[in-house]
Amino acid sequence: MPVPALPAQPAHDARTVLVTVTGPDRPGVTWEVFEAVAVPGIEVLDVEQVVVRGNLTLAVLLTAGPDEGAVMAAVHAAGARLGMTVSCVAGSGDNAPRKAGRLHVTVLGAPLLPSAVASIAGRLAGRGANIDRIRRLSRWPVTTLEFDVSGDDVLVLRRELAAEAVSHRVDIAVSPAGLARRGRRLVVMDVDSTLIQDEVIELLAEHAGRGAEVAAVTERAMRGELDFAASLHERVACLAGLPESVLAEVRAAVRLTPGARTLCRTLRRLGFTLAVVSGGFIEVVGPLAEELGIQHARANRLEVVDGVLTGRVVGEVVDRAGKAAALRAFAEAEGLPLERTVAIGDGANDLDMLAAAGLGVAFNAKPVVRAQADTAVNVPYLDAVLYLLGIPRADVEDADDADGTTAGDPGGA
């Protein structure tokens, strides 16, 4: 069977008509408009339609055809029947090609104020970048807008917008557009104060009556003031003599971060691979990972002799370098390049992992981590990370409804 020839590209100076229709939305508006222009010689070149609070805006770019005046008259007549405002602008050519350097800018705010949007748009304009499209990914519990931008560089724009994020108390992520954002990814999460609200070693230390002492050391280690491995050995020594049974008690006491279940459930539905890597303990992390359907888990192992904790760990400590090594190993096992990995963490021992990943997310993190990560999330809902990946809240909720899943809190934990 012969292959048909490709149609010729429209001439650059071909006459076109831009039709814009605005007014109250109701069923049948789009049909009326396109029915009005369904005449020989007219082709559809582009369409954009959006509904905001019950008000519709429909923009249609058409070839002018043999009688552009008749086309305009037909659209105006349809608008009159619909009680809507119609604008028709004659011109020539299709849309201008988008600039090179396509990317996404995602903005999260609770609340998101006009001044923040204005500052971001101003930065983009000042750099000569163009906003091609804006859409809302979520309204609750945070408002998230995604800007499709062309004509800029990801790394440079991240630095440029970091100041706006701090100034306006919003979270801003900049990521490449196109195929790089689609398809399967590996998402690797820290556990303590990221996937869960607690620090497991502090929960264990409370059973030994040394919770406050251990918490103070943990805080200094997470700020990067202490060597992690040395601080871990110091803290684990405080657990010597505890019965092994406290591990089950601590597992039962652990509190998931709001949105953790929703994040894991949604990413599994999309075919993503999930992993956790922790400076905590596999005795707690392992069962938690199994519960949430997380495929890979790596953490330290506590030494137990005759049913009692010895105050030592077994094997090499999972420290800052160990977390990055784990991310690389998980990616290799899944056959994924590092560019297709996402790392989420809060402490200084997560920095190497965040740097190694294609996208490093600082989640309610210490200042040193926020300053070095690709982006930060400072709302208390872990599923806000979904928006950074371009996954809208409506899609998450629709999938939950279809499965009969009920979100337990604002973040869907």
Image (cartoon, helix red, strand yellow):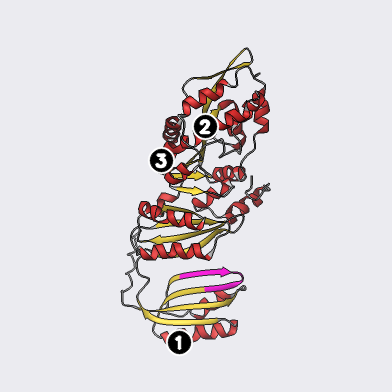
Numbered badge on residue 278: 2
* Mark before the other along the chain sequence, 1 or 3: 1
In percent of width and height, residue 171 lies at 50, 53
Give percent across and percent down for residue 400. 64, 49
The quarter of the picture where the N terminus appears is bottom left
- In space, the residues marked 2 and 1 are separated at their CA atoms by 68 Å
Q: Quadrant of residue 78?
A: bottom right
The tag earlier along the polypeptide, 3 or 2, is: 2
**Residue on which the image places disc 3:** 355
Left or right: residue 227 compared with residue 305: left
Residue 219 image label: none
Count the marks.
Answer: 3
- Label 3 amino acid? Ala
Residue found at the very far top of the displayed protein: 306
**Label 2 CA crowd tier, 10 Å (few <14, some 14–19, many 20+):** many
**Is residue 85 left or right of 125 when viewed as pictured?**
right
Q: Amino acid at mark 1?
A: Ala
* Magenta span contains residue 56: yes
Pointer 1 residue:
70
- Of 126 and 297, nearer the camera is 126
Near mark 3 (Cα within 10 A), the count class, few <14, some 14-19 or many ≥20, is: some
